[in-house]
Amino acid sequence: MKLASLKGPTRDGTLVVVNRDLTRAVDASGISPTMQHALEHWHEVRPKLLDCAESLACGAERHAFDFAQALEAGRVAAPLPRAYEWLDGSAFLSHVERVRRARNDHVPESFFREPLMYQGGAGDMMGPRDPILAVSEDWGIDLEGEIGALTGDVRMGASAAEAAGAIHLLTLVNDVSFRRLIPAELAKGFGFVNGKGANALAPVACTPDELGNAWDNGRIHLRLVCHVNGRWLGNPNAGIGATFDLPQLVAHAARTRFLRAGALVGTGTVSNPDAESGYACLLEARLVEQVETGEARTPFLAFGDTVRIEMFDRHGETVFGAIEQVVARTGQ
């Protein structure tokens, strides 16, 4: 099952059910008004949403509308327009190694026992066609393609097996980063704030069973395809190279707190060690260039640039739809 949110009438949007090829959708607000409501009442509303999805697939929904048209018109919000929590891991070892090397740092030994994770802003999730806003290109604007899990309630101290049962939906995330603001912020020893922009989510979120055998051992074994200005940046496999899977990340986030329905937990930037897979963020490309040639040639994003992040199944069909954003100057 694939779910999405249209913008309005409130900040939490309107829940819709979307067909498998993302061409048609139907308003599901009669079952559950918003994605947040659906996550809070998942076991009650899921069977009704599944019935709606089956009717849509059979062409029996008389009030279905053109979802692709709504998407291109900018009417599609993030599946969860605002989350109760955004907890972002950094599970891919090759990404951690490259980024730490840039800071003359090393991968902490504890990384192999417990995840790296920070808590970021969650009150304003960008839709898949919303612009990436920044005041200055000097901030070092970067994309970061990753996987996100939308959860139901997770008890404090939950095991990874319990956490797996609370992962109701999966989606893609563009975790926008301002690279040149991060070093000074981390030097304070108190984590990210200004170095991270608002996140964008893919057009739809999918139940794990929608992915078939590509969802295995808490990982999505598909490639995350990233482009900048139409040029291929990379297609790392999200099922390879992660030290921790999504249930382990959710369990780590819930170690000392109850996670409430509507939490979003990320894998961190998808990254593979082989150069042939390219990259899901510009920083990694720059770091590899710096090591190999002594010069980082790949620029960070500039105003007017376009980024595209998408994942395809083994038949070449889009799974979550594309995050496609233009970088724009904000007047604040």
Image (cartoon, rainbow, N blue to C red):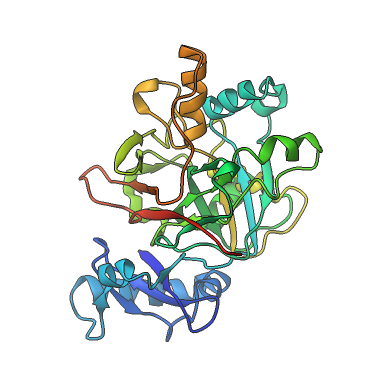
Nearer to us in this view, 101 or 316? 101
Please determine whether, in this image, residue 262 is positioned above or below residue 58. above
Q: Nearer the viewer, residue 226 or 249?
A: 226
Q: Is residue 306 left or right of residue 193?
A: left
Left or right: where 206 falls relative to 110: left
**Residue 278 seen in the current view:** yes
Residue at left 55%, top 61%?
330
Q: Quadrant of residue 182?
A: top right
Estimate the x, y position of residue 117 in percent, counting from the top left. 67, 41
Up/down of 111 relative to 195, above or below = above
Query: Residue 25, image x and y in percent?
Result: 29, 74
Residue at 72 percent of width and 26 percent of height? 110
Residue 7: where, in percent of width, then height?
45, 76
- Where residue 59 appears, as percent x and y from the top left, is 18, 76
Quadrant location of the C terminus? bottom right
255 sits to left or right of 130: right
Name the residue nearer the viewer: 152 or 105.
105
